[in-house]
């Protein structure tokens, strides 16, 4: 097994989170999001990324039940999971780093079903970075089946 994991670190609500780089397609400025009525509250709308329509999820809404105040540093991180490609809105995308495996500890809350997508916490230079498993995150979202069906119907219309 590799001794390091490469991750994209981002900030939400002053906390740092990370997603394994292999899930990340791109990091983009926030633009071109079309709001769609009746989608779950955490979905800002859909966006076209590389000729594919994807749902854009406000991760702050998922984690903290608050919408992100979009600022110049806010970013959309486009992720590819087995289930679906999604964009997640974050307060700021910070950096791509290597985290040594020995720096990652399991999360005490891992048994808590609502946060099952937290795969561990890395303690790096006295800062904590919570690791997120995007596949589990997408699967855990309420109403994700409806979103997948909606996205499939939109794809067929194109």
Image (cartoon, rainbow, N blue to C red):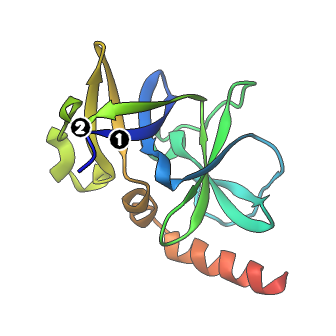
Instruction: State the quadrant of the C terminus.
Output: bottom right
Say which residue appears at 84% left-offset and 50% top-offset: 32
Q: How many marks?
A: 2
**Placement of 150 over or under 52, stated as above or below:** below
What's the CA distance linking mark 1 and mark 2? 7 Å
**Placement of 68 over or under 143, stated as above or below:** above
Say which residue appears at 67% left-offset and 75% top-offset: 151
Circles 1 and 2, Cβ within 8 Å, touching? The answer is yes
Residue under numbered circle 1 = 5
Say which residue appears at 48% left-offset and 53% top-offset: 22
Residue under numbered circle 2 = 101
Q: Is residue 87 left or right of residue 62?
A: right
Residue 98 x/y as whole percent: 39, 32
Q: Is residue 108 left or right of residue 123?
A: left
Residue 35 x/y as whole percent: 77, 56
For label 2, the SS is helix
Residue 105 x/y as whole percent: 18, 36
**Placement of 127 over or under 102, stated as above or below:** above
For label 1, the SS is strand
Residue 119 x/y as whole percent: 28, 47
Q: Nearer the viewer, residue 63 or 54?
A: 54
Q: Is residue 151 left or right of residue 41?
A: right
């Amino acid at each position: 097994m590799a001794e390091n994991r490469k991750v994209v670190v981002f900030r939400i609500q002053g906390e740092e989170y990370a997603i394994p780089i292999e899930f990340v397609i791109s990091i983009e400025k926030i633009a071109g999001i079309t709001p769609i009525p009746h989608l779950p509250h955490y979905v800002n709308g859909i966006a076209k990324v590389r000729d594919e329509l994807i749902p854009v999820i406000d991760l702050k809404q998922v984690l903290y039940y608050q919408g992100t105040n979009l600022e110049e540093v806010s970013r959309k991180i486009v992720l590819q999971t087995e289930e679906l490609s999604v964009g997640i809105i974050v307060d700021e995308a910070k950096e791509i780093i290597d985290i040594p495996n020995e720096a990652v500890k399991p999360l005490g809350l891992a048994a808590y079903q609502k946060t099952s997508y937290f795969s561990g916490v890395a303690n790096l230079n006295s800062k904590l970075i919570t690791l997120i498993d995007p596949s589990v995150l997408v699967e855990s979202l309420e109403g994700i089946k409806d979103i997948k069906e909606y996205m499939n119907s939109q794809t067929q219309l194109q």
